[in-house]
Image (cartoon, helix red, strand yellow):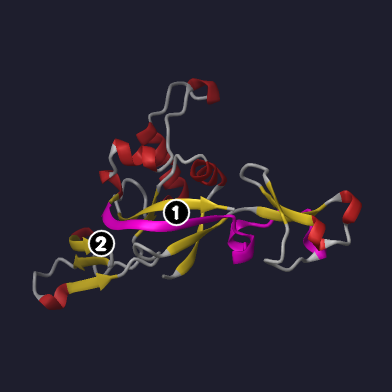
Amino acid sequence: MKEKPILMSGDMVRAVLDGRKTQTRRAVKLIPQDKRTILCSFSNEKGAIFNDGRGLSVSTFVPIRCPYGQPGDRLWVREAWMPYFRPSSMSSPSDGGILYRADKSRIKMDTRGRWEMSRVGKWRPSIHMPRWASRITLEITGVRVERVQDISDGDISEEGISPLPKELGYNKILSSRTNFRNKWDSLYDKRGYSWDDNPWVWVIEFRASKL
């Protein structure tokens, strides 16, 4: 079993905590040759094999392992956080804890990590979260590859995505699919993996546990 970190935004962290999110999709970034001609020829729990469009000879198949792991491996979630101390005990790390920005919940500090007094009270970005501060662990139960636009309505729900109602300031109800598309493009459009490009994605299914 291997463990790796994975970044999640606040709304996705809340979806995991609520039990609404059991899947995540990440762009397949190591793609050989011309992206326009690639066909997925095979995928299983160990990764995927892509054909670069030049034919079906063995030499044109390029195996790519999922960088996030395979079933049985674990992902620990990185999210925005900060250390805190109780006002009456600023000098005692054992009386402090961790505050998570996604839902403003707190976990009492133990011996898992080390404190930096100068950074107390300042939000730290998810990329800087150490393993000991993570409260969510995801056990991978399945890995596959597909085009991002092939996501089903059921899988959109498993991604923790729901329609956005008019009450949130929209002129009309945004469907779950439109909501997912907007969230995808907010993360990947500028990286060259926009929804309209219909890139290959890793589909990672998981079970979540938390502190």
Q: Which residue is mark 2?
A: 35
Q: Is residue 179 left or right of residue 35?
A: right
Return the disc, 2 or 1, that comes first in the chain's sequence.
2
In which image quadrant can residue 83 be found? bottom right
Find the magenta span and give its range: 117-146
Residue nearest the observer in this picture, 77 or 169: 77
Q: Residue at x 74, y 55 (%)?
A: 97
Q: Residue at x 30, y 36 (%)?
A: 153
Spatial CA distance of label 2 from label 1 is 17 Å
Residue nearest the observer in this picture, 58 or 116: 116
Q: Position of residue 53 (x, y in %)?
A: 15, 66
Q: Position of residue 2 (x, y in %)?
A: 43, 70
Magenta span includes 123: yes
Q: Is residue 157 left or right of residue 102?
A: left
Residue ranking furthest to the left: 56
Q: Is residue 129 left or right of residue 152?
A: right
Q: Position of residue 159 (x, y in %)?
A: 40, 43
Q: Which residue is mark 1?
A: 190
Q: Amino acid type of disc 2?
A: Lys
